[in-house]
Image (cartoon, grey):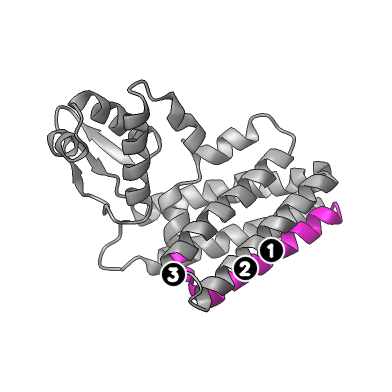
């Protein structure tokens, strides 16, 4: 679920704020996989009844971030190595296809938008590396930038169902943790891959675009699996 969908919460602005706060904490790892989310404690923390908390937890479950337990609240979802591998396997197919279609259908205006996103990300990364902004703030901004970049490609493919499919299998905790474990040089490599993708789109070369995107997603999968401890095969 993206931020625009959060506005549909029936319990109003307070529930939306709680949803966004819990979602951010899960994505950034401040609420750890397996951690309990108890309705009574959350209601007391946020100063609300249990009704909006239940609604928020239901939405977080739909996001793939929480597992609900009957009358017990929920827990932050734990993903195994195999689940992460399988999710990225789907992303290889979905985003490879999206890149292929983008190379065929992308407009000049869309190419400029993608180029601007890359330039923005490069600027953020250099500021984070030079201590002009904190590393954590830099990662947050790079995650949002990365999501916009990949969402834009899915949208550019001129397939009405493609963006929704991309949203379904792009799990924010994986994106955040992947960029976090890259380090500065890994992030620079990722942005160079983004630039190569835009070059393939500009050349309207679907084979090259698909190959580059699959390499890009594979690179991310290897990074997150490598970061997982062999002693703890879940994330």
- Toward the viewer: 35 or 21? 21
Compared to 227, does 204 lie above or below?
above
Asked whether 227 falls inside the magenta stretch, the response is no
Q: Residues within 10 Å of mark 3 (few under 14, many from 20)?
A: few
Of mark 1 and mark 3, the one earlier in the sequence is 1
Would you name the residue on which mark 3 appears? 134
> Residue 34 location in percent, x, y?
22, 49
Q: Quadrant of the C terminus?
A: bottom left
Disc 2/disc 3 C-alpha distance (Å): 13 Å
Q: Residue at x 56, y 61 (%)?
A: 218
Would you name the residue on which mark 1 appears? 119
Q: Is residue 97 visible?
A: no
Q: How many marks?
A: 3
Residues under numbered marks 2 and 1 in contact, where contact means CB atoms less than 8 Å apart: yes
- Toward the viewer: 91 or 110? 110
Compared to 48, does 182 lie above or below?
below
């Amino acid at each position: 679920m993206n931020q625009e969908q959060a506005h549909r919460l029936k319990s109003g602005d307070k529930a939306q704020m709680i949803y966004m706060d819990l979602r951010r904490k899960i994505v950034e790892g401040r609420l750890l996989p397996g951690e309990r989310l108890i309705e009574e404690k959350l209601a007391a923390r946020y100063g609300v009844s249990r009704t909006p908390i239940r609604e928020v937890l239901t939405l977080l479950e739909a996001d793939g971030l929480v597992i609900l337990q009957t009358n017990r609240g929920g827990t932050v979802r734990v993903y195994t190595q195999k689940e992460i591998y399988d999710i990225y396997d789907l992303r290889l197919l979905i985003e490879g296809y999206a890149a292929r279609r983008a190379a065929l259908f992308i407009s000049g205006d869309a190419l400029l938008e993608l180029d601007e996103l890359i330039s923005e990300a490069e600027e953020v990364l250099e500021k984070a590396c030079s201590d002009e902004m904190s590393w954590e703030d830099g990662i947050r901004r790079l995650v949002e930038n990365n999501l916009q970049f990949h969402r834009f490609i899915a949208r550019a493919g001129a397939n009405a169902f493609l963006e929704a499919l991309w949203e379904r299998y792009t799990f924010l905790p994986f994106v955040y943790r992947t960029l976090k474990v890259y380090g500065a040089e890994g992030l620079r490599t990722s942005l160079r891959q983004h630039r190569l993708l835009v070059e393939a789109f500009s050349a309207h070369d679907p084979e090259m675009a698909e190959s580059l995107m699959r390499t890009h997603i594979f690179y991310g999968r290897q990074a997150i699996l490598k970061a997982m401890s062999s002693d703890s095969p879940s994330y």
